Amino acid sequence: MPTAITTRTRMRLNLNLNLNLNVNARLRQTPVKLASSYKPSLRTSDVGAGTWAWGNKLIWDYSEDDDAKLQKAFDILVDGGVSFFDTGDSYGTGKLEGRAEQLLGDFASNYRPSPSPFAPSPDNLVIATKLAVYPWRITTKQMKNALAASQKRAQGRIRVVQLHWSAGNYQPLQERCMWDSICTMYEEGLVEAVGVSNFGPKQLKKVHDYCAAREVPIAVAQTQYSLVSCQQEMEDHRALCADLGIQMIAYSPLGLGLLTSKYASLVDDDDNDNVDAALPTSAVRSSLLKGALPGARTLLRTLRSVARDNGRTESEIAVSWCVGKGTLPIVGVKNVDQAQSVVRCNDGFRLSAKDMSRLDEASKTFEQPIARNVFLTK
Ligand SMILES: NC(=O)c1ccc[n+]([C@@H]2O[C@H](COP(=O)([O-])OP(=O)(O)OC[C@H]3O[C@@H](n4cnc5c(N)ncnc54)[C@H](OP(=O)(O)O)[C@@H]3O)[C@@H](O)[C@H]2O)c1
């Protein structure tokens, strides 16, 4: 796929998207639509996958030996109709920066559609990257170069570009240039849709208005959102997205792994050794999860109960709660089991209003909201 999207390529993509939609109608009963002036709008599965862990040794214990396992997980996701993949040019620690984009490009190229009639073509995947708003990236040209580098790593498969965070908090003059850069990328047909990440409601409205004046729709806005991260600020963000026709993306929908059976099974266990044994080896994530667990007991008990009532796992219920709120959750996936769980989240299941409100109430009992992303602006 060339970097610039030609009219012919666009027509082919749209045709593929339509075909894909029909074939996957059973799997994706209400596909998510992303704002774009390309017709028809980009559509994706109800639930997507995130790749922060792919290449991250510090927080996610990544090792190059994991790549074969990750390719299998990717194949299962795509075979199962999961079509939205979130990545970022800063994903990958140290020398591995950009690793997640590169792996996505490799996996999509290596992917061989299964004989299943539901298997989409890799060309139908919606790969969305986030460009880091580093303080030294101050011109549109620099951002376009960054996108070109991402496209090279991902073998030209990136269709959506997002600003990873806003410079509004620390370098307001840089901010306008960042907004110009995503508009220019869209106007020049380098991507099919644009979006932002970690923009609080005030900043989101500003960037929306700027882009709207150039007739560039903001398709997606991602923020940290889950049963352990749904404070008023996030709810304001959700309301604003609904108002402006922006698809809100919920990142860290499992609270970095807290909202899963692994931790739900520990809530009645007072043996510290069992808790310690369940914690990840990464010191950062381990201390975060250990600190959050005591305040999450009531929430995790409710999650477990709703999961049992619906014949689903705790993580599937936590993700379905995000879907029930109208967001597109992107689940961090590291292995085959987790990929299968995300595929099950895409089968059209919806929580009842009663279960949604049970979970809403339980989320209020969580005493120590997962740390707010430092990059999130007002
Ligand atoms: N825009 C931003 O600034 C930003 C920030 C953060 C994340 N994101 C995006 O959002 C994605 C998801 O967020 P996240 O990775 O932070 O966290 P998350 O989705 O809340 O949690 C992911 C972790 O939960 C565990 N897990 C996943 N599925 C599971 C299952 N079915 N059963 C049990 N455990 C399961 C895995 O860890 P273990 O197996 O180790 O337990 C996995 O790595 C990221 O990959 C990234 O693409 C964006």
Image: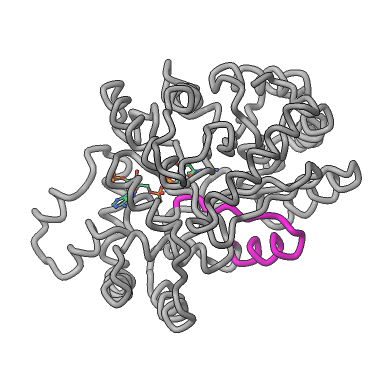
Closest to the observer, 140 or 125:
125
Residue found 39% across the figure and 55% down from its top: 254
Name the quarter where the C terminus is drawn.
bottom right
Picture colour scheme: one colour
In x, y percent, where is residue 361?
43, 79
Would residue 211 appear left or right of 321 to someone viewing this image? right
Q: Is residue 118 left or right of residue 135?
A: left
Q: Which residues, given as a range, are shown in magenta? A: 234-252
57 falls in the magenta region:
no
Q: How many discs mark residues in the rendered view?
A: 0
Q: Is residue 207 above or below residue 292?
A: above
Q: Quadrant of residue 154?
A: top right
Tell me the quarter of the picture where residue 166 sits.
Answer: top right
Q: Residue at x 46, y 46 (%)?
A: 118
| Above/below status of 134 relative to 34 | above
The quadrant of the picture occupied by the N terminus is top right
Pick the residue in front: 104 or 284.
104
374 to the left or right of 286: right
> Where's residue 288, x and y in %?
32, 50
Magenta region includes residue 246: yes
Q: Residue at x 75, y 65 (%)?
A: 243
Q: Give x and y (percent) for residue 365.
A: 38, 75
View extreme (bottom): residue? 354
Locate residue 321, reporting x and y percent.
Answer: 46, 67
